[in-house]
Image: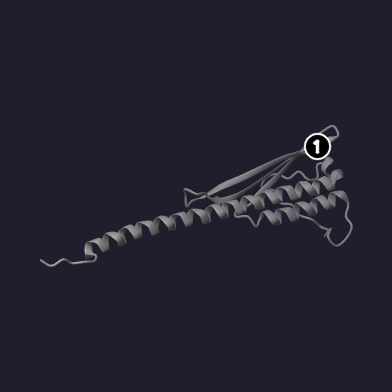
Amino acid sequence: MKQYAGFTLLEILVALAVLAIGLLGAAGIMLNSTRMASSSYLEAAAQQYAYEITDKMRVNQTAVQAGSYALASGASASYSTDCSQQACTATTMAQYDLAQWQKEIATLPNGSGSIATTASGSVTNVTVNISWGDVKIHSLANASASISITTQL
């Protein structure tokens, strides 16, 4: 009787099936990793925008105390003077800052923001909310994400 050495066709098919399952698993991990990286990027950008507007408010305390930085969700901010080109009053600077901030938030998918200011003596409590559309890790459907930062100025 002859002895055959090597692999049979059945063994090769089983090995290919195991390899295919492994490659599908690796592709799924890469897809989830890409989604998480995108989600993290959007959250980091939103946090940067929130801290940026609070820093601008910290510089323009007069307008903060007057309530010029308050902005309702869905409201549109506009400005008449380009404060990057000429000197502005505190109120005009607040309008310019808010309009620029809304342009930045618009770079987020379905991005929107609001700012609430509450004066309490010499201190003003500021809450900055930003929300955007985000694809969650376990779903291909768009969901919303948001951050909220509260500080005292």
On the rendered structure, is 97 left or right of 8?
Answer: right
Q: Residue 149 location, x and y as percent? A: 70, 41
Depth order, front residue of 151/77:
151
On the rendered structure, is 16 left or right of 23?
Answer: left
Q: Secondary structure at mark 1?
A: strand
- In the rendered image, the residue lying farthest to the left is 1
Residue at (22% x, 64% y) in the render: 8
The answer to whether 128 is drawn above or below residue 32 in the figure is: above
Depth order, front residue of 70/122:
122
Write down the residue under mark 1. Answer: 124
Mark count: 1
Depth order, front residue of 118/9:
9
Residue at (66% x, 56% y) in the render: 106
On the rendered structure, is 122 left or right of 114?
Answer: right
Q: Residues within 10 Å of mark 1 (few under 14, many from 20)?
A: some
Residue at (74% x, 52% y) in the render: 77
Q: Residue 139 location, x and y as percent? A: 47, 49
